[in-house]
Amino acid sequence: MKILIIEDEIHNANRLQSMVREICPDVVIAGILESVADSIDWFKHYDEPDLILMDVRLADGLCFEIFSACTITAPVIFTTAYDEYAIRAFKVNSIDYLLKPVHKPELEAALSKLRQISGNQHQADPMIANLVEIIKKQEPVYRNRFLIQVPDGYRTVHVDDIQYIYSEFKVTHLVLTNDTVYTVSQTMDELEEQLDPGVFFRANRQHIISVHSIRDIHNFFNGKLKVVLHKHPEVEILISREKAALFKHWLDR
């Protein structure tokens, strides 16, 4: 069996590789990848493995961006510290969803499940098969507004009115097209998951930007990109070299 490991923490990747070899001594590790961009490039040049062990949060974004850019039919065992992506995972070939730290008996059970599915494809429970198909066909529901508390009560803010979002001292701020700034309780990680990825991009740890707010994109040092916003050109938003290819793919959809 040929297995591809997609994991941005090297100690976790090495631990997975070690457990897999203990469970299946004849396994071939096709590669260990750390980012969305590297994974997209890998699938463009190599044949699919028999199985993918995949973390959800990678160095440059969520793993689901890989499935948006590539056609992948190989089964996937997700390994993650986050439990909120399980439904989304079952839309993209997931056969199991293991929470970190992953233990050998859990991984062994997941691999056993893969063998059972592979050996009994025509005997699968039709109710389970129908449920998976229903989940896959469901359109994701993204946040379209925020309820903001203001001194005299509450105000509704629509996501279409957001230029960009930034985090400062672990506090998240929405910057609107009229330059009003509101503080929200959600973290940047939570908003990255809740907002439509076709419109919003996680530029770096501090910024999420709307595609409608981008004026220019310039080459920067060491393969980075600098994004200039229409109304706030003074705000420095940098895209890392590792994330630059993914950002350009996002813009070119």
Image: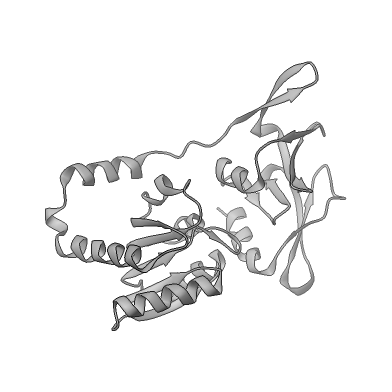
Any part of residue 41 in sight: no
Side of 24 where 138 appears, left or right: right
The number of discs equals 0
- The colour scheme applied to this rendered structure is one colour
Q: Quadrant of residue 227?
A: bottom right
Q: Quadrant of residue 102?
A: bottom left
Side of 148 where 107 appears, left or right: left
Residue 59: image location, x then y, percent: 60, 64
- Residue at far top of view: 152
Name the quarter where the N terminus is drawn. bottom left
Q: Quadrant of residue 175?
A: top right
Above or below, comparing residue 181 to residue 224 in the picture: above
Above or below, comparing residue 5 to residue 205 in the picture: below
Residue at horizontal 45 percent and vertical 40 percent from the top: 140
- Residue at far right of view: 234
Residue at horizontal 29 percent and vertical 45 percent from the top: 132
Residue 122: image location, x then y, percent: 12, 56
Residue 7: image location, x then y, percent: 50, 68
Above or below, comparing residue 206 to residue 158 in the picture: below
Task: Tell which of 17 and 230 is nearer to you.
Answer: 17
Task: Tell which of 68 and 82 is nearer to you.
Answer: 82
- Residue at far left of view: 123
Residue at horizontal 33 percent and vertical 79 percent from the top: 22
Task: Tell which of 220 and 89 is nearer to you.
Answer: 89
Any part of residue 60 in sight: yes
Residue 184: image location, x then y, percent: 70, 35
